[in-house]
Amino acid sequence: MNHSVSARSSIAARLAPIRSSVGRLSSWADQRTAFRHRLPIRARIALFGAAVVALTVLIFSVLVYVIVSRSLVSQQDNNLKQQGDYVWRLLESGRPFRLGGPSFPLVDLKNGSAPFVEIVPLVGQPLSTGTINDNVPILPDSVGKSATDRGQWIDVQVQDGPPLRAYVRAWSVPSASGYVLVAQTLSGVEGQLAGLRLLLLAGGLLSLVGAAAASWLVAGRALRPLDAMATTAEDIGRTQDLSRRLPETEPDDEVGRLQQSFNQMLRQLEDAYHRLQAALVAQRRFVADASHELRTPLTTIRGNVGLLLKRDDIKSDDRVAALNDIASESERMSRMVQDLLTLARADAGYHLEKAPIDLLPIIQEVSRQAQTLEPSRRIELLDGVPSPVYGNADAIKQLLWILIDNAFKHTHAGGRIQLRLDNGQRLARLVVFDDGPGIPKEDLERVFERFYQSDAARSGEGTGLGLAIARWIAREHGGQVTADNNPQGGAAFTVEFPVDSKVLAKS
């Protein structure tokens, strides 16, 4: 175990200089190419495309140049070998032949690039079809030393002449011996290679320019939606118009998905903005209504307190009446503050704790207590069947008390309030009827607004928050509460709760 740890430490120590060098090289490269961060994305894409094409063309050009160069040299060597072996066979056979005829024409090495033949005997003057300034080329002594029976290729630099590529082979007959040389100037191959270099260079430059232009155009077309997004975002920031959208006409690629995401973000921002505006309007109205509603009990309390403090000769009955007014308004203000606290918690995202419960016992209990509290009004529970739901018992009791208390306020003494509980397959429906004056049609929805009280039914005793709390409780249970008019007269409030199928199955 220790040996393995020490071995890893040793390897890490040996690799540390390499990592340090790589880090320094990377830092150096980042410093030298820091300008790229100041270039626009389109220019960077164009430069990257041009660099890739340039690297590809460079590699391709080098490969082509190397292959063609080797091919030309190999072709030249083969031609020289064929001619050299042909002359060698003639010399070996002893057949007569003449240099300078149609088969072996004379060549001026300074002006021509055709191959020439030179026969160099060990004794005597050399014979050559090549000339330099009308003289036989003077070969260095190393050429004769390089001649072998099998022949080989060598590079030769003649006196006052161009460099040559030569094939040299020794020959020997009974009457003489020496070597034969077939050579050709390198100007022909060099000329072809120079043309190839010029062609590759011109093609590379054209490819580089074409790649940069194509990359610039393609990048511009690809980035056009992004530019449109930036322009739209700037216009939205300037005009605050969140209803604007990008045209989703692009294919389902990265840019198209980005457009869809951008539009989805705009839709969410617009919805959030509208909700925020509505919340601000509701908050202003809520604050204004709360201030208005709280001002009345505070004014009453202050007036009665001032009366009690300033007058010592107030009668006992007046004093009791003033204290009763103070107590009544204080209780009303306390209820209002409690209702405001409940709604504030609802606005802050407070959620009720729920558990499986049955609505029937809750309705029976509330009905009995309400009848005891208001014996002058008759409360009837029309139907009573088990209705299992998933909810909060205390909150549902509060909802029932809000609806029954609302019915109390709008039902005359001796009136009748009816409760009906229906248990369906999916919904449990609770309906509270009264025989009061009913609700105007234009107010059926507005009665659930905070601090709203119908002018036709305003009694001055409520705070205008009860039905708003009832709606919140119903929504917390996944249900809803609606208002309607009873065909027999009066109002009808209907509350629907989703039935808890698990509890129903167990029962």
Image: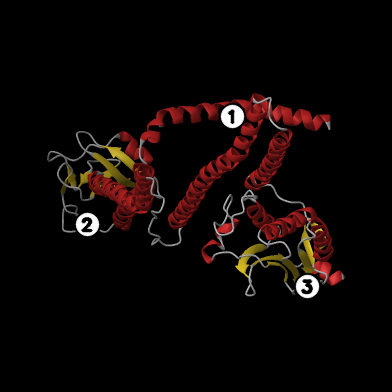
Farthest residue to the right: give it: 507
Count numbered badges in the picture. Answer: 3
176 left or right of 386? left
Q: Helix or strand or loop: what does disc 2 sit on?
A: loop
Q: Quadrant of the N terminus?
A: top right
212 left or right of 310? left
Q: Is 505 rendered above or below residue 29?
A: below
Query: Alpha carbon of mark 3 to alpha carbon of mark 1: how far?
Result: 87 Å
Q: Helix or strand or loop: what does disc 3 sit on?
A: loop
On the image, the x and y values in percent for residue 349 come to 65, 47
Q: Name which residue lies at 77% across and 65% down.
A: 378
Q: Nearer the viewer, mark 3 or mark 2?
A: 3
Q: Quadrant of the C terminus?
A: bottom right
Residue 400, picture quadrant: bottom right
Tell me the amino acid under the disc marked 2: Phe
Q: Nearer the viewer, mark 3 or mark 1?
A: 3
Residue 416, picture quadrant: bottom right
Q: Nearer the viewer, mark 2 or mark 1?
A: 1
Q: Name which residue lies at 76% across and 63% down.
A: 377
Q: Which residue is mark 1?
A: 19
On the image, the x and y values in percent for residue 296 come to 59, 40
Tell me which label, 3 or 2, sits earlier in the chain: 2
Q: Nearer the viewer, residue 352 or 300?
A: 300
Tell me which label, 3 or 1, sits earlier in the chain: 1
Q: Which residue is mark 3?
A: 382
Farthest residue to the left: give it: 134
On the image, the x and y values in percent for residue 270 come to 46, 51
Query: Alpha carbon of mark 3 to alpha carbon of mark 2: how far?
Result: 140 Å
Q: Which residue is mark 2?
A: 97
Residue count near mark 2 (Cα–Cα under 10 Å), binned few <14, some 14–19, many ≥20: few
Residue count near mark 3 (Cα–Cα under 10 Å), binned few <14, some 14–19, many ≥20: few
